[in-house]
Amino acid sequence: MGVLGASSYHIFVAFVFVINLVKDLKVLTPFSTVSNIFTVFGFTLLFFYIIETDVEVSEDQLYLKDIQEVPVFVGITLFALEAVGVVLALEYNMDDPKKFLGLFGLFNKGMAVILIMYTLMGVLGFLKYGYDIEASITLNLPKVKIAHIFLAKLTTEFVKIDLNDSSKRDDNSMDMNPSSAPHDVIGINSDAT
């Protein structure tokens, strides 16, 4: 069963269950702040780990090998930047949702930071490891077991609960009937509540 025993998995499941009971994103704000600090810290460590040794660039690395690989690149990039469920929940919970969109809105600013971080890590990782790079650059680091997938799952579960909870909606909130766009996009049926 790997490094962790069955009892460890039961503890993880219990923790995920308790976190999924949270119905307001504002409760998770301190945890999100700590998580963002750790993410920036992790990116910084990874950046320095990559550049601590000489990065040799071969001429072979500078050319596009096959044009058929471009759609895969676009797909991976869109997957990394896509967070429709989380974005809808964030916009709904904002005091002034108009500040979320627009050319210099919170969404574009946040995506710009994420795009720069992903691009920097992608380019530096490829220059360091070349074609031996793994799908995630962290797999090229020394092997240490961490529960990053478990922690990332918590954020996505909030959206399912929030969209199905119609008890806190008022007349000024988003229209959350089954025919509204958010349900069609995400595929959540509010008739189940």
Image: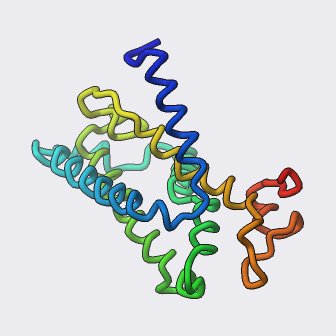
Farthest residue toward the top? 1
Farthest residue toward the left? 53
Q: With respect to residue 182, does 139 lie above or below?
A: above
Question: Based on the displayed image, in which of its 4 quarters is residue 84 positioned?
Answer: bottom right
Q: Residue at x 47, y 12 (%)?
A: 1
Q: Residue at x 67, y 60 (%)?
A: 162
Total of numbered circles in the picture? 0
Residue 63's spot in the image, x, y percent? 37, 49
Question: Based on the displayed image, in which of its 4 quarters is residue 18 positioned?
Answer: top right
Residue 176's spot in the image, x, y percent? 80, 69
Q: Residue at x 38, y 56 (%)?
A: 118
Given residues 86 and 166, the one toward you in this image is: 166
Q: With respect to residue 54, does 92 lie above or below?
A: below
Q: With respect to residue 152, does 180 lie above or below?
A: below
Question: Based on the displayed image, in which of its 4 quarters is residue 22 positioned?
Answer: bottom right
Given residues 48 and 106, the one toward you in this image is: 106
